[in-house]
DNA sequence: TAGTGGTCTAGACCACAGC
DNA sequence: CTGTGGTCTAGACCACTAG
């Protein structure tokens, strides 16, 4: 028995749910019943059921029992690695080019205003390549009050995203994903026709409420798929 | 004290991490130290620290201790509600129209092949409206072997997505998000110019490995933002 | 090998929602 | 009211690993 007991219990309960044998709304056995069935302490089955509740598979109600949840919202965990990792995951060679680097005060309105930071910033524009072809254009500002070390970094070789991930802790992020047509400048940078459909990803990153960085990344539509998987429980399968 | 102790401990530890006071790599106090500090059982502090580990805020290593995690992957939880909910959340009125409904055997290749289902299916095309304007075009197949009840449902009033959520349990889903230009048909259906940049969302849904439904939803680019928030911990803030 | 986290027990009391 | 889940205790033994 290498697997912990509470994990085995979770897996068995989850299997009953995922197979459809226990449909939404079904009341799963009470904790004292599970305790008797597995011959263990209630804390152990409670931990097992708690994991299912955290995963959204069941809903626990005092005095009533624990019920198989009725899924009504599609929730997905999206992992957005930095672009180098993303490109290499596709088995392509990664390239990087800095197009522009200049200090600039952070703006108050618009997307930048959401950062909740005002003061000196560093504005960067760069391109990422996959197998020598443009993969993404990136437009970023870094809040120098939050990350003063960035002022002395030459980003001509190191992509700012990778550098930030290595040097700065972040605690919150928000993404917005939309489609947009390429204007003339962008079309030239991405080597596509003007008006070409592109995927635009905007990401704000904060640490303890203080804005760290805002980045807009634009990908040629056909080159990039954002993949989001939902596995409500990682129990035994 | 209405808040459970383990929750208070989690919140206090998380605050130290999110403020940057405990940077990535910092070793947080040992469990026996926290136990002494809070005057409680070790199981209680262990539960608190476990929640932080589950949220990805810390990493626990036997014999070494528990360390503030070094975030390196942007992970976000995306909640994709059904379109009616999405529209109404924006404070707009929702409308629905069925364009086509016909039985069809599921295909083996392409996107449909991923469903891992072969046999009778139901193909549906419909439009969603927000404030009377086209909001999305939806192209869906339902696996009738998994959901035989769908054969008898008239989807002229009820959007299939909402019906499925109410009648079928699902256990796994995968999304792909990309940008695409509108072809002539789509442009007419969405009331945009041909070539207009649109957001395409493909979702596969399974239950216990059996494909339930595949849906492709296309939104006019400027009308739709997919929002993804990351809050690594919901402790006290 | 010593000390950490990981797991588990056999109790206990409580809040609260259903009956 | 009754019985459920929610929380907590004061122990215990184990697995693993860093020193």
Image (cartoon, coloured by chain):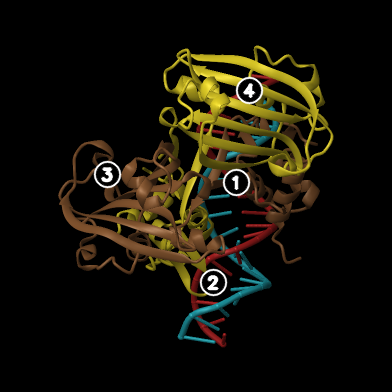
Chain colours: A brown, B yellow, C red, D cyan
Q: Where does residue B61 sit, x and y in percent of width and height? A: 52, 69
Circle 2 is placed at which residue position?
B62
Residue at 63% x, 49% y: name it. A47
Circle 4 is placed at which residue position?
B162
Q: Within 10 Å of the Cα at label 2, are there few (<14), some (14-19), or many (20+) other Cα atoms? A: few
Circle 1 is placed at which residue position?
A229
Label 1 vs label 2: CA separation?
31 Å
Q: Within 10 Å of the Cα at label 1, are there few (<14), some (14-19), or many (20+) other Cα atoms? A: some
Q: Where does residue B137 sit, x and y in percent of width and height? A: 57, 25
Q: Is residue A54 left or right of residue A120?
A: right
Label 4 vs label 3: CA separation?
36 Å
Q: Which mark is residue B28?
A: none
Q: Is residue A30 left or right of residue B40?
A: right
Q: Within 10 Å of the Cα at label 4, are there few (<14), some (14-19), or many (20+) other Cα atoms? A: some
Q: Chain of mark 3?
A: A
Q: Nearer the viewer, residue A216 or D11?
A: A216
Query: Contact (CB < 8 A) between labels 1 and 2?
Result: no
Q: Nearer the viewer, residue B213 or B46?
A: B213
Q: Which mark is residue A115?
A: 3
């Amino acid at each position: 028995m290498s697997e912990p007991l509470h994990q085995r219990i979770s897996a068995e309960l989850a299997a009953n749910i995922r197979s459809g044998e226990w449909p939404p709304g079904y009341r799963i056995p009470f904790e004292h019943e599970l305790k008797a069935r597995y011959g263990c302490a209630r804390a152990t089955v409670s931990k097992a059921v708690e994991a299912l509740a955290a995963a959204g598979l069941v809903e626990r109600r005092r005095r009533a029992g624990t019920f198989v949840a009725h899924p009504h919202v599609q929730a997905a965990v999206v992992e957005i690695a930095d672009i180098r990792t993303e490109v290499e995951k596709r088995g392509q060679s990664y390239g990087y080019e800095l197009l522009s680097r200049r200090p600039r005060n952070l703006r108050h309105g618009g997307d930048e205003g959401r950062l909740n930071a005002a003061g000196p910033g560093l504005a960067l524009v760069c391109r990422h390549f996959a197998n020598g072809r443009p993969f993404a254009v990136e437009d970023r500002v870094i809040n120098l009050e939050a990350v003063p070390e960035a002022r002395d970094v030459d980003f001509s070789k190191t992509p700012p995203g990778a550098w930030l991930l290595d040097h700065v802790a972040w605690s919150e992020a928000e993404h917005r994903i939309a489609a947009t047509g390429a204007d003339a400048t962008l079309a030239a940078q991405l080597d596509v026709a003007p008006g070409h459909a592109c995927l635009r990803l905007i990401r704000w990153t904060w640490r303890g409420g203080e804005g760290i960085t805002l980045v807009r990344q634009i990908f040629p539509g056909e080159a990039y798929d954002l993949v989001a998987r939902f596995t409500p429980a990682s129990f035994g399968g």
